[in-house]
Image (tube, helix red, strand yellow):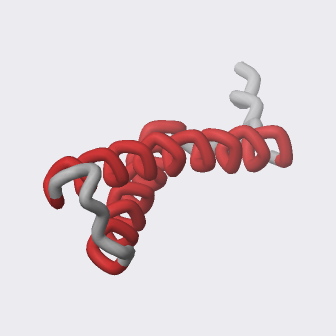
Amino acid sequence: MSEPSRRRARRAPRIGPFLLTGGLLGLVAGLVVSAVGPATNRYGAMGELGFLGVGCAALGVLLAGIVFILLDRRG
């Protein structure tokens, strides 16, 4: 009987937590910008809050995806 060969497992990051964290950080950033930024007469407060929250969350997911790809290629 031969011994089973031991291979070193490649530790790769998982994409789900990266994208979720990026989306949540983007959402928080959008909410902060909406709350701190100047008020506009064009949109209501909730419309501005939702628009900036969703837009920044999408940007956060995009940036998290780029970071994931860079880390995955490096490893």
Find residue 43 and report its horizontal and vertical position in percent. Answer: 23, 50
Query: Compared to 40, does 12 lie above or below?
Result: above
Looking at this view, is 68 or 27 the one in front? 27
Q: Residue at position x 31%, y 46% from top? A: 51
Looking at this view, is 6 or 73 the one in front? 73
Residue at the outermost bottom position: 36
Residue 9 appearing in the image: no
Q: Is residue 51 left or right of residue 47?
A: right
Find residue 42 and report its horizontal and vertical position in percent. Answer: 28, 51
Residue 17 appearing in the image: yes
Q: Residue at position x 58%, y 48% from top? A: 64
Q: Residue at position x 70%, y 28% from top? A: 4
Assign the N terminus to one quadrant of the image: top right
Q: Is residue 67 left or right of residue 62?
A: right
Q: Residue at position x 32%, y 52% from top? A: 53
Find residue 69 and report its horizontal and vertical position in percent. Answer: 72, 39
Q: Is residue 68 left or right of residue 40?
A: right
Which image quadrant is residue 9 in?
top right
Which image quadrant is residue 34 in?
bottom left
Looking at this view, is 32 or 28 the one in front? 32
Which image quadrant is residue 28 in?
bottom left
Residue at the outermost front position: 41
Find residue 33 and report its horizontal and vertical position in percent. Answer: 39, 70
Residue at the outermost right position: 74
Q: Is residue 8 left or right of residue 61?
A: right
